[in-house]
Amino acid sequence: MIAVESSQLQMIDKVVHISRVAKVVKGGRRFSFSAIVVVGDGSGKVGYSLGKANEVPEAIRKGMESAKRNMVAVPLKESTIPHEVLGKFGASSVILKPASPGTGVIAGGTVRAIMEAAGIHDILTKCVGSRNPHNVVKATVEGLKKLRSLEQVSKARGKNVLEEAASA
């Protein structure tokens, strides 16, 4: 797990996993690298990508550039998420639960990287099923995409925020 602070817009970059892959050719094996990279602004935006290249630093750079282009907004409620959610991708499922202030990020390495990049400081998580880093990253981001803030829900239901909070 490598954390890098970029100078432009203070993006938080984290390398989740690096794989060495081999292509068997006539003369032997050709090795290259793939890197899963997570990028966030620390205040509710996060993206991920897979970079592939013949050298590790180049794979990480490619992943970071692609992740910056594929960022999604995450609604936050102070330092946690608005409600519990389940993200699924392939055989991986990730349960995300809001936590009270001071709890911290209770998560494994893969999910922790995404939460820290997104700026979530208090959360409880659990990976169920496959723990393949590719699928866990995708399941976590899928769960974060499902989150809705109180304002979004009340707007969709045609009520104002005060009415919605009173009925909850």
Image (cartoon, grey):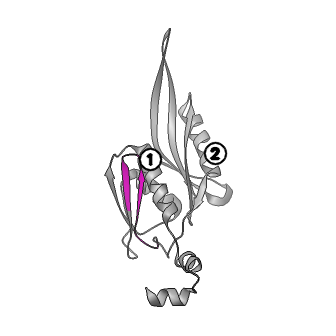
Query: In this rendering, would 66 be left or right of 81?
Result: right
Mark 2 falls on what kind of element?
helix
Query: Hey, which quadrant is residue 97 in on the image?
Result: bottom left
From the viewer's perspective, is residue 42 above or below residue 88?
Answer: below
Location of residue 168 in the rendering, given as x and y in whole percent from the top left corner? 43, 85
Q: Earlier in the sequence, mark 1 or mark 2?
A: 1
Looking at numbered disc 2 in the image, what kind of residue is underneath it?
Answer: Glu
From the viewer's perspective, is residue 105 above or below residue 92?
Answer: below
**Which residue is located at x 56 percent, y 65 percent?**
44
Q: Work out which residue is located at the far front of the displayed protein and give it.
A: 157
Location of residue 116 in the rendering, given as x and y in whole percent from the top left corner? 48, 60
Q: Return the residue at label 2.
A: 65
Looking at numbered disc 1 in the image, what kind of residue is underneath it?
Answer: Met
The prevailing secondary structure element of the residues shown in magenta is strand
Location of residue 40 in the rendering, given as x and y in whole percent from the top left corner? 56, 57
Which labelled disc corresponds to residue 1?
Answer: 1
Query: Hey, which quadrant is residue 158 in on the image?
Result: bottom right
Location of residue 129 in the rendering, given as x and y in whole percent from the top left corner? 31, 49
* Residue 54 within the segment the image draws in magenta: no
**Which residue is located at x 37 percent, y 49 percent?**
92
* Residue 84 within the segment the image draws in magenta: yes
> Along the line of sight, which residue is nearer the eye, 6 or 107?
107
From the viewer's perspective, is residue 77 above or below residue 16?
Answer: below
From the viewer's perspective, is residue 63 above or below residue 75?
Answer: above
How many numbered marks does the figure carry?
2
Q: Which residues are magenta?
A: 82-95
Count residues near mark 2 (Cα–Cα under 10 Å), then give few for <14, some for 14-19, many for 20+: some
